[in-house]
Structure formats: structure tokens, C-alpha cells
Amino acid sequence: MDKNSQDKSSKFFKKEGFYVVLFVCLCIIAVATAFGIRNARIAKKPVATDVSSINSEDKNVASLDIDDTKETINNATEAKNDKSTKNSAVADSEKENKSAAVANTNTGKFINPVDGTLVKTFSNETQYCETLGTWRTHFGIDIKADLGKTVKAVQEGVVTKVANDNTEYGQYVEIKHPNGLVTRYGNLDTKVSVKVNAKVKQGDAIGTVGKTSGNYSNEKYGSHLHFQVLKDGKDVDPAKYVSYKETATK
């Protein structure tokens, strides 16, 4: 090859080489731009599964919060109910104790008001009265006892009446007891040992056997204590509360 040919070839490659390099650079830039755009699109694309997962987790958390709140409320309610039940039980227990205390007082047994024997019983039917010569009901019992024999309160209570009617009861004393019963002691001596509103204990002396009942002053069984028990203002049989040996004489 001659020198002129070599010079022409060299000039051609120099001129065309520039364009080849330029083309390669443009291709590289185009490829890089394409990858950049693709990556940007991928980054912007929403991930449905992630959102769904997040929503599911939020729902689970909300559900747990609601369940915890319900459990807290239920525990508070149970605690309140338990406290209320305990308070009610304590109140009921106190009531029962008070009732028991009252019952112990109310069911206290009577002692006999005087030493003696039963000579005339309680009766809603008429019985013969020797002193008056008539038939009369007898809302009490007569206990034969010597004149001057001590008469005692059958149970603790308060004296509500001290009087003398000179006929049916003569000199008598009435005592109201804690159980609501009232006892009446008749045919006493006029010198009694208590006054109205006086508090008496079981066994306290209230007077002595006398002869002041005009309607029963000449009964064949002689000196006696007339004893009555009233419940809610009505006469009841004293034999239910005291115990005496009954004699044949009525």
C-alpha cells in the first residue's frame, strides 16, 4: 500500500471513530434513563398486600383494645357487684344479730309471780263467782297464796299503771315487757313497792298479796293473787307463760 492510501484510511477512521463513540455514549445514556424510569414507576406502584396486612393488623389491634376495655369494664362491674354483695351480706348479718338479740329478750321465760297453787283457771266461758253469786268470765288465773306473800315481776319491764278499782282487780300493778306483753297483778295490798314509769328487773318485788278485790273477796279458796297476761291488748291464758300445780278447788 502506498503512502497516499494509508493517509486516506487514517483520516477516515479518525472521522468515523468519533461518530461511533458518540453513538455508544448515547446508547448508554438511553439505557440508563430507561432503567431509571422503570425503577421510579416500581417505587410509586402501591403494594396492595402490604396495605391489606396493615389494615388487618390495625383491625386486630383495635379488636384487642376493645376486648381489653370490655374485660376491664366486666372486672370493674364484678368487683362492684362483689362489694355490693359483701355489703349486703354484712348488713343482713347485722340485722340477724340484732334480731337474735331482740329474740333472746323476747323469748325470756317468765318466773312465777308468787309462790302458791293454781285455784282458778283462765276461761272465756263463764265460771261461778261465790262472792257475787253470779257466773262470770275469768280472763286471768287466781293463785292461792298467804296474805303478805311477796309478789314479783315475772320479767323485766316498765311499770305502766298503779291503780285500785276496788272491785274487779282491787289494788293492781301493770308492767309492760320488752316482748310487747303486759302483765297485770291484782288483789294486792294497798302498799305497793313500785311507781309508774319505774323500771323493774325480773324477780323485783312489786307488792304483796292483799284482799282488795271486792268481786272476789269471799271466794272459798281464800287469799290469792289475780294474775293476767295481755298480748296486743287482748287477754291470753297466763298458764302459757307460768307454771303452777293446779288444785281441785276452782
Image: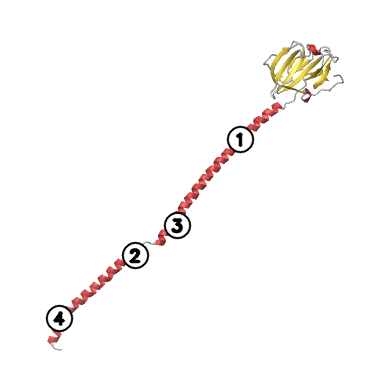
Question: Tag 4: residue type?
Answer: Lys
Residue 115: x %, y % from top left? 80, 19
Q: Nearer the viewer, mark 1 or mark 3?
A: 3
Q: Secondary structure at mark 1?
A: helix
Disc number lying in front (2 or 4): 2
Label 1 vs label 4: CA separation?
Answer: 119 Å
Residue at the spot 66% in from the left edge and 30% down from the top edge:
99
User: What's the CA distance linking mark 2 and mark 4?
Assistant: 48 Å
Q: Relative to 53, does residue 163 appear above or below in the rendering?
A: above
Which residue has dot 3 on it? Answer: 56
- Of circles 1 and 4, the one toward us is 1
Of the two numbered discs 2 and 1 in the rendering, the one whose residue sits closer to the viewer: 2
**Residue 50 in the image: x percent, y percent?**
41, 60
Sequence-earlier tag: 2 or 1 = 2
Q: Is residue 98 left or right of residue 1?
A: right
For disc 2, the marked residue is 42
Q: Does residue 27 lie above or below 66 as drawn? A: below
